């Protein structure tokens, strides 16, 4: 069936671009493509726009605050396009995942983006000068592909022996629904602190383990240390009363013995709990699904050229939290949105379009093509 679809597709006019993913990165770069003058493109979303955010635990909120600051020439930290603000549309400073999913759907509708929901991409291959994008329903042709699949729907589950006995925080619908009085949380970054905070708020005791000590990292880069939102939460009275921190304590294994869970730390200590340990070990990222189309950096992330394009397969671009350049990590929305215009300009230039309107992105901090200005640390 796929081969028959491929044959008919090769005769059809190709899209100028196909964007894979309808989350913050996919919607944001699609708007940039539209501003660059592209009309013949489509956004493919496996479920619905913003679905990964909608799947967050009900209590989890954005660590970055939203303010409607467009009127003074500054963009809301959680905006993915010029002229929009989650603070304005949602009237919330720290949106929940469900809030933000609703915001993304509203943005996609406002900009009249060509989104195809319920479309699962199975395979991407280069066929001559074009790409073939096999979906569960048909095969599309495109001159360019932008991979914006995100990461939140791909939790990292295999960090140590017995991790299958744990429950990843990304699979929890609500912390209020978790039964038990004592919990073990493995991972001390944002999602781990978030889990501990909400459990402690219910007077439940938590032991939180991390191989490092992210709440004491001596850096102002939010990609490497906890946000001020989380640090402030850790100072809440109930957090200090109910949460016991174990920094510098990696977990080597988890075993289920006689209905209980035995957690073994790297220093040889054993800890027991009646509830499945909560794994807050981050996400694998969707880029692994197209790993064969990218060369790898030493850290395993895709190797990109200056336009966030694959060095292995020209015409394939990456958008979202997996973008890396040198030591620069573009993992938060307000970071990776700075590269939307870079990708859109590269695609527009390839098509012979002037893309003059994208210069407007610079004054809003949405067009970062000079990375030499990045990396400055706060001195006080």
Image: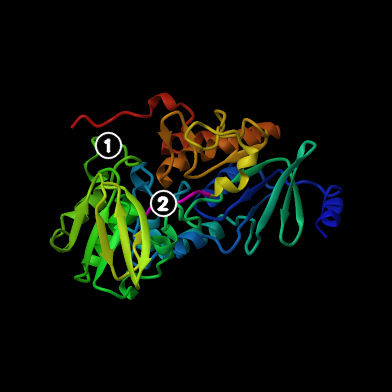
Q: Which residues are magenta?
A: 280-285
Task: Name which of mark 1 and mark 2 comes first in the sequence.
Answer: 2
User: Can you give x and y, in whole percent of width and height, for residue 147 in the image?
Assistant: 60, 45
Q: Which residue is denoted by mark 2 in the rendering?
A: 160
Left or right: where does residue 319 sit relative to residue 38? left
Which secondary structure is most common in the magenta stretch?
A: loop
> Is residue 380 or residue 93 the one in the foreground?
380
Left or right: where does residue 192 sit relative to residue 12? left
Disc number at residue 36? none
- Check disc 1 and report its element: helix, strand or loop: loop
- Check disc 2 and report its element: helix, strand or loop: loop
> Is residue 278 or residue 342 the one in the foreground?
278
Mark 1 and 2 residues: CB-CB less than 8 Å, in contact? Answer: no
- C-alpha span from label 1 to label 2: 30 Å
Q: Which residue is denoted by mark 1 in the rendering?
A: 220
Given this view, does label 1 or label 2 mark the residue nearer the observer?
Answer: 2
Query: Which residue is drawn at the image coordinates 61% and 36% (left, top)?
Result: 294
User: Can you give x and y, in whole percent of width and height, for residue 205 in the image?
Assistant: 20, 66
Location of the N terminus (image quadrant): bottom right
> Is residue 376 or residue 106 the one in the foreground?
376
Query: Which residue is drawn at the image coordinates 37% and 62% (left, top)?
Result: 255
Q: Residues within 10 Å of mark 2 (few under 14, many from 20)?
A: few
């Amino acid at each position: 069936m796929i081969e028959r679809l491929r044959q008919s597709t090769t005769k059809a006019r190709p899209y100028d671009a196909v964007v894979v993913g309808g989350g913050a990165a996919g919607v944001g770069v699609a708007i940039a493509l539209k501003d660059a003058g592209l009309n013949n493109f489509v956004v493919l979303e496996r479920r619905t726009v913003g679905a990964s955010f909608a799947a967050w635990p009900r209590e989890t909120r954005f660590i970055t605050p939203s303010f409607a600051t467009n009127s003074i020439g500054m963009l809301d930290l959680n905006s993915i396009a010029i002229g929009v603000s989650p603070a304005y549309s949602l009237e919330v400073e720290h949106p929940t995942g469900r809030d933000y999913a609703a915001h993304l759907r509203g943005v996609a509708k406002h900009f009249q983006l060509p989104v195809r929901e319920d479309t699962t991409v199975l395979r991407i291959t280069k066929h001559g000068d074009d790409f073939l994008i096999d979906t569960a329903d048909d095969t599309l042709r495109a001159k360019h592909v932008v991979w914006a699949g995100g990461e939140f729907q791909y939790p990292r589950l295999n960090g140590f022996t017995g991790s299958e006995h744990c429950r990843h925080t990304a699979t929890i619908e609500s912390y209020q629904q978790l039964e038990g009085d004592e919990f073990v949380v493995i991972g001390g970054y944002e999602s781990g602190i978030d889990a501990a905070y909400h459990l402690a708020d219910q007077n439940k005791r938590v032991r939180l383990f991390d191989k490092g000590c992210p709440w004491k990292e001596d850096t102002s880069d939010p990609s490497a240390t906890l946000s001020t939102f989380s640090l402030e939460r850790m100072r809440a009275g109930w957090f200090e009363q109910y949460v016991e921190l174990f920094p510098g304590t990696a977990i080597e294994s988890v075993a289920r013995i006689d209905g209980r869970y035995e957690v073994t730390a790297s220093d040889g200590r054993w800890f027991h709990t009646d509830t499945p340990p909560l794994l807050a070990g981050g996400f694998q990222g969707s880029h692994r699904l197209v790993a064969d189309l990218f060369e790898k950096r030493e850290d395993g992330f895709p190797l990109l050229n200056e336009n966030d394009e694959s060095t292995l397969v020209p015409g394939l671009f990456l958008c979202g939290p997996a973008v890396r350049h040198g030591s620069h990590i573009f993992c938060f929305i307000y970071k990776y949105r700075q590269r939307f215009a870079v990708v859109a300009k590269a695609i527009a230039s390839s098509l012979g379009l002037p893309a003059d309107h994208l210069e407007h992105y610079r004054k809003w901090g949405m067009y970062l093509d000079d990375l030499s200005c990045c990396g400055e640390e706060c001195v006080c």
